[in-house]
């Protein structure tokens, strides 16, 4: 029996109210996840990243350099080791983010004009903290070197701007075009939320379909018009999941006040395309597997690497070919390019059309899903031949 017309009259909303787990996934769970993720990264700016120092010189200059590192608000000299082996052990155990080795002739070499070599090891496996630690160390070391050069210039009788010019002959200025404050919450949360949202879309779609499989069987639910039954089943969730996208946009760019430079309309339209594209992939997996537990496991394997493959924390151009292929098969990878281009870069609408077209291509997944569903129904309705 085909129950699709009853869905349009409110049947799906009635079932949704009875399924507490599914109701939670479309109501309070996304809101709690958004608040939790924001709270985790709410500090916004990194502070007190732990570093360790091995001082082999024990001079006034080496102690001054250590204090200079510790004065940087992004760094904290947490430990000082007597030997390099102890420092390497702490670094490998991730007790500190970086290890600085000050050479034994640091002050003596500096006084005679021979540049000493300060060695820094840091854990680049942790991309964010490693990059921030290395950047802060370079900044602190550069400032300290400029002070030493300025002191030498003063000792040679140069004063004022002449001493500064001798200390820093080339003055560089680096200006961030986007995310000027280097707020890593704005950098990470705006990407983590869409990745989590895609997982939510696929899981909600599969749970809704699995309910029909559990209650009346797949072919009985699909009836004579599988395409109509599937579309009627999915459209309420399409609206709800699209509303989730609007809510996290409002949370990030209105409540938190992060900068929105582009078109709300383009982002919202792309969000709708992403919801439909993700649902298309989910329904295709469902009719292929036809088992609730197995299809959820397969969906988890499909969507779990979303954040890693989006190209936000690691450039997509540097990924291996299998990773780039997987990335192209994830709707969120195309959506996030539109969100970043519009919200951060203020790009034109036409520049987002290629990614929107890619999301439209995902809708083709509905066609094989409908054909497979139709074949399942025809196979179920086919009369058995009995030979006597």
Image (cartoon, rainbow, N blue to C red):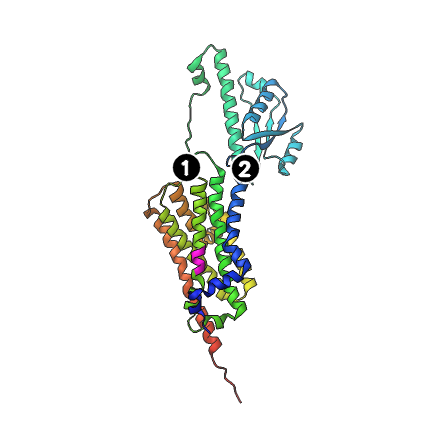
Q: Nearer the viewer, residue 154 or 320?
A: 154
Which residue is identified by label 1? 178
The percent coordinates of residue 256 (x first, y second) are: 46, 40
Horizontal and vertical percent position of residue 20: 55, 59
Residue 110 appears left or right of 315:
right
Q: Which residues are magenta?
A: 236-240
Which residue corresponds to mark 2?
A: 129
Q: In this orientation, which residue lies closer to the viewer: 250 or 305?
A: 250
> Label for residue 80?
none
User: In the picture shown, does residue 109 fall above or below 229?
Assistant: above
Report if residue 239 lies within the magenta region.
Answer: yes
Residue 4 highlighted magenta (yes or no): no
Count residues near mark 2 (Cα–Cα under 10 Å), then give few for <14, some for 14-19, many for 20+.
some
Number of marks drawn:
2
In which quarter of the view is residue 63 placed?
A: top right
Q: CA distance from mark 1 to mark 2?
A: 20 Å
The image shows residue 194 at horizontal and vertical percentages of 47, 49
Q: Is residue 366 above or below residue 147?
A: below
Q: Nearer the viewer, residue 205 or 50?
A: 205
Instruction: Tell me the chief SS of the magenta region.
Output: helix
Q: Is residue 107 above or below residue 246?
A: above
Determine the residue located farthest toward the top in the rendered image.
157
């Amino acid at each position: 029996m085909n129950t699709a017309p009853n869905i349009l009259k409110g049947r799906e909303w009635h079932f949704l109210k009875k399924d507490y787990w599914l109701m939670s996934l479309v109501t309070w769970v996304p809101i709690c996840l958004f608040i939790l993720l924001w709270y985790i990264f709410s500090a916004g700016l990194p502070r007190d990243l732990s570093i360790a120092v091995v001082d082999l010189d024990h001079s006034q200059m080496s102690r001054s350099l250590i204090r200079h590192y510790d004065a940087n608000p992004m760094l904290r000299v947490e430990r000082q080791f007597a030997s390099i082996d102890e420092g390497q052990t702490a670094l490998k155990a991730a007790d500190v983010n970086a290890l600085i080795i000050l050479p034994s002739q640091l002050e003596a070499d500096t006084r005679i004009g021979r540049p000493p070599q300060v060695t820094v090891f840091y854990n680049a496996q942790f991309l964010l903290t490693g990059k921030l630690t290395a950047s802060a160390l370079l900044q602190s070391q550069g400032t300290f070197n400029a002070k030493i050069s300025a002191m030498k210039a003063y000792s040679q009788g140069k004063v004022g701007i002449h001493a500064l010019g001798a200390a820093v002959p080339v003055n560089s200025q680096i200006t961030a075009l986007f995310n000027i404050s280097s707020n890593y919450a704005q950098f990470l949360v705006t990407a983590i939320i869409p990745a989590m949202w895609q997982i939510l879309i696929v899981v909600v779609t599969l749970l809704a379909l699995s309910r029909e499989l559990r209650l009346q069987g797949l072919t009985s639910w699909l009836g004579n018009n599988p395409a109509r039954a599937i579309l009627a089943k999915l459209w309420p969730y399409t609206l709800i999941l699209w509303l989730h996208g609007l809510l996290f946009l409002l949370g990030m760019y209105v409540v938190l006040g992060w900068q929105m430079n582009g078109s709300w309309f383009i982002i919202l339209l792309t969000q709708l395309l992403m919801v439909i594209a993700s649902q298309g992939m989910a329904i295709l997996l469902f009719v292929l597997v036809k088992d609730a537990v197995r299809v959820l496991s397969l969906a988890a394997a499909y969507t779990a690497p979303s954040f890693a493959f989006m190209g936000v924390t690691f450039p997509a151009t540097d990924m291996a070919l299998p990773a780039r292929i997987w990335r192209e098969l994830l709707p969120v990878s195309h959506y996030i390019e539109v969100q970043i281009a519009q919200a951060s870069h203020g790009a034109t609408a036409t520049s987002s059309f290629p990614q929107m077209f890619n999301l439209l291509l995902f809708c083709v997944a509905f066609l094989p899903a409908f054909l497979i569903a139709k074949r399942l129904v025809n196979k179920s309705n086919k009369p058995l031949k009995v030979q006597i």
